[in-house]
Image (cartoon, grey):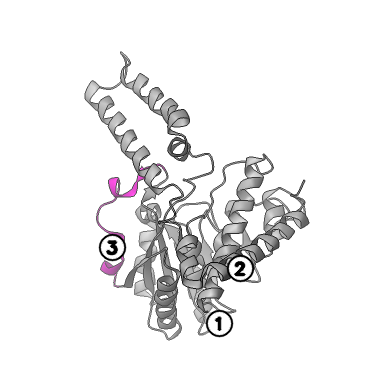
Amino acid sequence: MDAAGLFRQMARARAFEDATSALWREGRISGEMHLGTGEEAVAAGVVASLRPGDAVALDHRPTPVLTVLGVDLAGMLAEMLGMESGIHRGRAGHMHLMSRTLLASSSGIVGSSAPLGAGFALAGRALRPGSVAVAFFGDGAMNQGMLLETLNLAAAWSLPLLLVCKDNGWSITTRTDAVTGGDPVARARGFGLETVDVDGGDVGAVAEAAADAIDRARNGEGPSFLRARVPRLDGHFLGDALVRAARSPAGDGRQLLGDVTSAALSRTGGGLGDRARSVVRLLDLMRRARREDRDTRHDPLERARSTVGQEVASRLEAEALAEVGRAVAAAGGAH
């Protein structure tokens, strides 16, 4: 797929995420909402090398990949709106979207996409020779036992599987490096997997790396592990306190810091040193969130714009917005 085609898919994915965000903020979608904004280049770059018969296992941010795969947009929106016309009759919500036709499945259980992807790969080798499976997950999932067991099994059985780690540096509201020993790529290499580390905001680099890994899997050369470094543009979920603090330091930020400072100065609780360190950690988290929040230098869509030119990018984005707008109307989400 050429640069314009990749940008088109990224623009569609971003337009869908933004439409979902708007519906959630209007109170039309209930519960937590985990957007995949910032992951569009990974979705477009990896899916570009897939073909019918390949399978995809997804995590709790499934919609960018499902959008690029071609799952019905109105059906996904109706599903999240809890409507009978949704792709699962309004019973699955956004973390458990699936497509039997496209062999795509998502789960809200952290790390579960890896063993699911291994199962897809094993079944594909037996039923659809030459097919591959892809499992997408975040860096926080790298500390889940079932994912580490999958790395071992994929290598031991030489499964036609690509494991894609979308590394945004966060494990919910904790920095991943604070709770992780070693490096994810080194871990995967230790199991005997082929590994590659790419800039997940560069759709061309992702597409090239994924194409090589998928070709290896199709040719019976075993599994690969791709770590793509991505930004987390809207926090762990919509309404994330750290993102609100980053966007409104004089409002939400001051309130959050004030609450924590008050707790630190309380006569009860942990030792004064521990409480002081908690305030320092919060300040660091707020600083990092502020730096990452919707910064165009970290936004893969803005970065991809330069590869296709302003005129082409604007046209493709307008087409994506129109397509998603029609889907919103068809799903019953328009006022």
Earlier-in-chain disc, 1 versus 2: 1
Earlier-in-chain disc, 1 versus 3: 1
Q: Amino acid at mark 2?
A: Leu
Q: Nearer the viewer, residue 128 or 73?
A: 73
Q: Nearer the viewer, mark 1 or mark 3?
A: 3
Residue 209 x, y percent position in the rendering: 39, 75
Tell me if residue 54 is in the magenta stretch.
no
| Quarter of the image where one finds residue 206 | bottom left
Query: On the image, numbered disc 2 is attached to which residue?
Result: 316
Earlier-in-chain disc, 2 versus 3: 3
Give, as a single range, the part of the protein colored magenta. Answer: 173-192
Instruction: Tell me the CA gap for discs 2 and 3.
Output: 39 Å
Tell me the element at label 2: helix
Q: Which residue is drawn at the image coordinates 39% and 23% (left, top)?
A: 258
Residue 225 x, y percent position in the rendering: 37, 69
Residue 202 drawn above or below residue 175: below
| Other residues around mark 2 within 10 Å, as few (<14) / some (14–19) / many (≥20) | many
Query: On the image, numbered disc 3 is attached to which residue?
Result: 187
Confirm or deny contact between disc 2 and disc 3 (CB under 8 A). no
Which residue is at the far front?
Answer: 311
Q: Nearer the viewer, residue 250 or 131?
A: 250
Q: Nearer the viewer, mark 2 or mark 3?
A: 2
Instruction: Tell me the CA gap for discs 1 and 2.
Output: 35 Å
Tell me the element at label 3: helix
Which residue is at the far left?
Answer: 273
Confirm or deny contact between disc 1 and disc 2 (CB under 8 A). no
Q: Amino acid at mark 1?
A: Arg
Q: What is the number of the mark on residue 128? A: 1
Q: Amino acid at mark 3?
A: Arg
